[in-house]
Image (cartoon, rainbow, N blue to C red):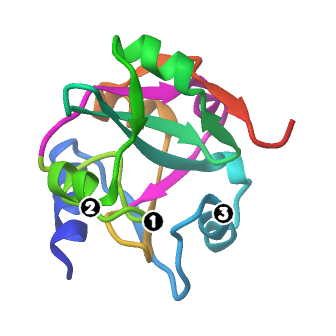
Amino acid sequence: MSKSLSRVKAALAAHGLEARIVETPASTRTASEAAAAAGVEIDQIVKSILFQGEGGGLYLFLTAGGNQVDLVKASTLAGEALSRADAAAVRAITGFAIGGVSPVGHLTPSPLWMDRHLLEFAEVWAAAGTPNHIFAVAPDVLQRMTGAVVEAFTVSLFS
């Protein structure tokens, strides 16, 4: 078992959650791939999107699969200008590679926000630390586990 997957399992267990982690034969790097693997709507996929601030810190935005982060709104929430975090920074701070970034189990915690649209579902699916592992969780449980602040910071990719 990979170190990343082990960290996610440990983080879930630390919160008393026996999550259903699924290993998929195909990649779940994108929201579309993850939705197909889980057999759910694209908006039930939790994308863990990381941005880097001018001071070098990372900010995590848990976003519904069919939405994208509005950079102006995200920067306002973070209190500084943000840009996409590069793969090296993501790996160094979270311990995960892009395409497998889980909302839990990070090496270093980052301030985080959650797309309010995710709360409209009974169950959402998130990366479990690898590009081939996902887990299901109730969105309110995910919000409590992560301590994410629920905000409106997205725009739909399909409107």
- Residue wearing tag 3: 35
What residue is shown at x 54% (from left), y 27% (from top)? 71
Closer to the camera: disc 3 or disc 2? 2
Query: Which type of secondary structure does the marked residue at label 2 adopt?
Result: loop
> Which residue is located at x 61 percent, y 40 percent?
122
Identity of the amino acid at label 2?
Phe
Report the front residue among 79 and 148. Answer: 79
Marking on residue 121: none
Which residues are the magenta region? 108-127
As rendered, which of 158 and 123 lies closer to the eye? 158
**Residue 9 coordinates in the image, percent (x, y):** 23, 61
x and y percentages locating residue 28 in the rendered image: 53, 71
Identify the element where label 1 is drawn.
strand
**Residue nearest the viewer, comparing 58 with 21:** 58
**Sequence order check: which comes first, mark 1 or mark 2?**
2
Q: Residue at x 21, y 41 (%)?
A: 15
**Of the residues shown, which amino acid type is indicated by label 3?**
Ala
- C-alpha separation, residue under disc 3 versus residue under disc 2: 20 Å
Give how far apart the Cα atoms at labels 3 and 1 are. 10 Å
Residue sitting at x 15%, y 72%: 3
Which residue is disc 2 drawn over?
96
Disc 1 target residue: 134
54 to 129, vertically: above or below: above
